Amino acid sequence: MSPLTIILAGVCNRSSYQKPDMKILASADLHLGKQSSNVSKSLSESSVKFTWERIVAYAVEEQVDALLLAGDVVDRDNRFFEAIGPLQQGFDTLDNAGISVVMVSGNHDFDVLPDIIRNREYNHVHLLGEKGEWEAKMIETRSGKLQVLGWSFPKQHIMEDPLLQLSIQNLDLDPNLPTVGLLHGDLYDRKSHYAPTDFTGFPAGVPHAWVIGHIHKPDIVRAHDPLVLYPGSPQALSAKEPGIHGASLLSFDGRTVRSEQVPLSPVRYEPLSVDVTGIEHQTDFRNLVLEQMRNYVLANVMKLENVSHMICDIMLTGRHPSVTDLDKWSQFADELEQQVEAETVVSVRKMINLAEPVVDNLEELAKQPTPPGMIAKLILDLESGDSTEFSEELMMDLKDQISSANRSGTYQPLSRFDEQIPDSDESARDILLKESRQLLGELLSQKENA
């Protein structure tokens, strides 16, 4: 079965439904030039170029009326030369299929995307809103006229809400035509340096739908009047982007629009919990983890149809007599890889030991004025969220150490790969819990062996 057949198998098997008046494929945050982490760079699926080709193939096969791209098409650190070839090839394929492309630039490609567009003359590719000014474009599609308005980043950092500059009346829009707005901005952080946008500021009526870039997690911010959505990054780039990734298919029936997620990413990151209660030997531990990964894939075959590589973060749960042994066994996580049905290769990025030591009565132990008792009390406080002077002091000290490490030259490169540990209360609590459980297990083990 060809890759294109696999991509479109779900589409071809859909039950019949009334054909919409117009179909538009929407995406954002491709970051052409980047590769998914924890996947061998020698594999074509690791590169965003692979998913860009899937987007183009899907658009052609589904005969969509237009492709909309809401910024950060090109990654800032891997810019012009790595992006221009794949983009031009994709634009040519879409042109031959009669599909127009309309896009805006984001904070990563505010300067390079205009250069790429000007490098060749395209009649079917349109970049809207250069210089940070709202612009509207009416394009002819195989299904009729479509209006698109958009705003592009004029520089890397924008502190103002672009919607405050929007005047629908000045754009001379026809309210009877399907209309989509394109914007790259942050709807979740009012102090963002990347076009902080108030989601209540989207005008009623026209546009009927808004496609927003910048946030890599797919999300429908508003379901209607107007529809506002983040299609998310089409290819999952790191473990911070778990779940389904792809593009959004907008279907217009008159001026009514609905959205549908189209899974296209060949890479999937998933957290997976494994209960290690009763596991005594390393071989049993390894087999259990492999079995749980395999079971997950087999239970989600259809959802993983287009996924070539699934990378798991394994959370070890349950109770175990030696938390220290679990940590030792977890050091071989990168050796756990297997190919499951549907040609999905499953591997482990890391293991997080959340297992608790086997303690008959943690509450009773916490009452004892002993080192194990103090640790048991700390564990109970952290688990319940209760704040004590001791736990607060430990949390503050740990957050300071994390923040200092993140700023140091030694660990600064990790920020480029989203691998830094956040200096948040949640992160500090998780680390303290893990270390406290391990320490308690070691103290009790020493006591038993004394």
Image (cartoon, helix red, strand yellow):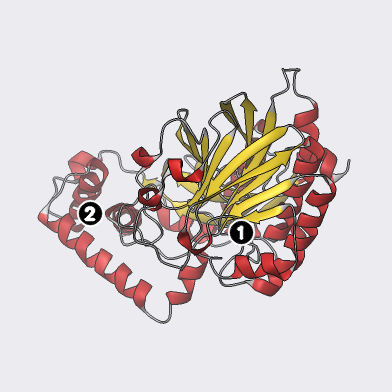
Residue at label 2? Answer: 375
Residue 216 in the image: state x and y as whole percent: 51, 51
User: In the rendered structure, which disc, 1 or 2, sits on the residue that comes first in sequence?
Assistant: 1
Toward which corner of the image does residue 340 lie, by quadrant? top right
User: In what element is the residue under mark 2?
Assistant: helix
Residue 286 in the image: state x and y as whole percent: 61, 50
Placement of 364 over or under 83, stated as above or below: above
Side of 349 where 367 appears, left or right: left
Toward which corner of the image does residue 71 lie, by quadrant? bottom right
Q: Quadrant of the C terminus?
A: bottom left
Toward which corner of the image does residue 251 lie, by quadrant? top right
Q: Looking at the image, which residue sits at the far bottom?
A: 409
Side of 392 where 32 appears, left or right: right
Side of 145 where 331 appears, left or right: left
Question: How many residues crowd mark 2 within 10 Å: few (<14), some (14–19), many (20+)?
Answer: many
Residue at label 1? Answer: 73
Q: Nearer the viewer, mark 1 or mark 2?
A: 1
